[in-house]
Image: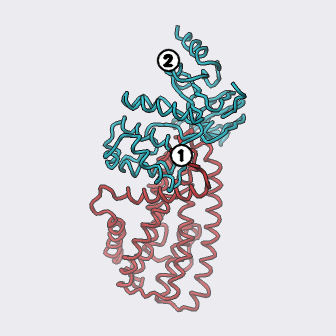
Amino acid sequence: MAEKEIAIKAQGLEVSFLIQRQGISSIKQYLLSFGGQKLFEKKKILKGVDIEIYKGECFGLLGKNGSGKSTLLRTLAGIIPPDKGSIKINGRIAPLLALGAGLEIEMSGIENIKLCCTLMGMTQKEIKASMSDIIDFSELEDDVNMQVKRYSSGMMARLAFSMVVATSPDILVVDEALAVGDLGFQNKCMAKISELRQQGTTIIYVSHNQEEIKRICDRAAWLKDGKIEKIGSVSEVGDTYLEQFN
Amino acid sequence: MGRIKYYNSRLKTYYETVYVVSIKNLKLRYRNSMLGFLWTLINPLFMLAIFVFVFKQVINNVDNYPLYVLSGLIFWNFFSSSSNQILNKIIESGGILKSVNIPPIIFPLSALISNLINFLLTLIPFLLLMFYFGFRPSLVTLLIIPALILFVLFTFSVSLILSCFNVYFRDIEMFWTTITPALFYATPVVYEAPKNMNWFMVLNPFAHFIELIRDILYRSQFEKYDELISMDIPNRFLTTLLITVFSTTLSLFIYSKLRRGFISNF
């Protein structure tokens, strides 16, 4: 293969969250110590992550719940500023596919497409142009005129995925949210993902299901307690990941 | 399907986002309600009725008391309803802010704009009502435009500070619901401020705004023009301008300091 172009390069990423100390006793302690004691404590989520993702590849991100997968993705997407480390992004990262984020349940599907696509950075002109594509892809047909609160979770997932794809990002992040749709739609999503890949879109696939990652990804990384435990070809990483359970 | 080019101008997108979210707020506000927009009128009218019928027994040294109350009440109402709504906006938008990289300030700002549009619409019937109570517009009335701009900026800065802190301590919401009525009575909205304001009123920024609005909409109807135009109104404009500059700077400073930690507290 020719020289690989880099889509994402992160070095020494450290991210921590401010965690509020709960309970009245802590506020009392805070006041009694005249501010010497902190009301918040820092919790380290990412402890020095180095990662390189090449353009046009499908990169799998494995890890247990709470290992820092979402935090890593949010940091890469520029949503969380890192404490330390550097990030280089080549292209535009799609909004993370958090299911139903930004959907306004009192409004209809169409109104939601307008709202969410605006929030994701599309201009009104672009939204108008891709409206019919979004509706077609979601297969919601006449239901787009219905209030989203009457949608099933699968229908919401369809709507969300269709909108994210419509922003035609350079780097697409696919979360497990996809599993919510029915089989037909899941297959359609997979077909769309491979179509996007052929057009040169980089895919980051996040899951704790290593089977799925093995099926579609080229390379993968295993994130454990905020550190990259292993990075490399998908079969290697998948196998090591499985071993921990045996 | 051709690939569309994005980010022709980030700022333009943000401007559009504020616009779209404001319209959404307006649409959602009265969805599923029968009287809809009328509620924005009913609330101050009801309060007006209370003060005219009840307080008139106590306060009888104010000329044209209904006009006096109304001119303060509609502006106070804008402040209290805006601040109480904006307060929650950053928390409410946590889901979006966790998944899309946009500045959080978009949400409080959109809430302010939708409230402002709502307010300007209610101003039409209220001006008619004030006319009925004997208000006669003149050139001085036009000063309400710069006064309103200052008042809106001040309202926004207070609300922005509250909504930033509310992300960290949800107590802010309870605190503000409790404190709003207290502020209402500490501000000369329904009673006349003493000629020499006591220390509490001097320190109460709302009092200065309400007094400015009063000068323009109420006192201009009775008092001698010259003194009002040459002394009172310019002085009050200066005070409120200073307050607004200070509060806006402070709010933007607090926002820029606190926004880093928003995401870990949603």
What residue occupies the far top of the structure in this picture? A246
Name the residue: 61% across, 54% down: B8
From this view, report whether residue A75 is shown above or below residue B230: above
Colour of chain A in the rendered structure image: cyan
Q: Position of residue A225 (x, y in %)?
A: 60, 22
Name the residue: 48% across, 37% down: A98
Q: Quadrant of residue B156?
A: bottom right
Foreground residue, B175 or B264?
B264
Residues at discs 2 and 1 in contact (Cβ within 8 Å): no
What residue is shown with label 2?
A211
Dot 2 surroundings within 10 Å: few (below 14), some, or many (20 or more)?
Answer: few
Q: Position of residue B90 (x, y in %)?
A: 51, 49
Q: Amino acid at mark 2?
A: Glu
Q: Is residue A76 left or right of residue B124?
A: right
Foreground residue, B7 or A97?
B7
From this view, report whether residue A133 is shown above or below residue B212: above
Q: Is residue A42 left or right of residue B33?
A: right
Image mark 2: chain: A
Q: Amino acid at mark 1?
A: Gly
The chain in red: B
Q: Position of residue A3 (x, y in %)?
A: 72, 28
What residue is shown with label 1?
B2
Q: Is residue B70 left or right of residue A33?
A: left
Depth-wise, is mark 2 or mark 1 nearer the camera? Answer: 1
Q: Is residue A211 something one can see in this rendering?
A: yes
| 2 and 1 marks on the same chain | no
From this view, report whether residue A2 is shown above or below residue A143: above
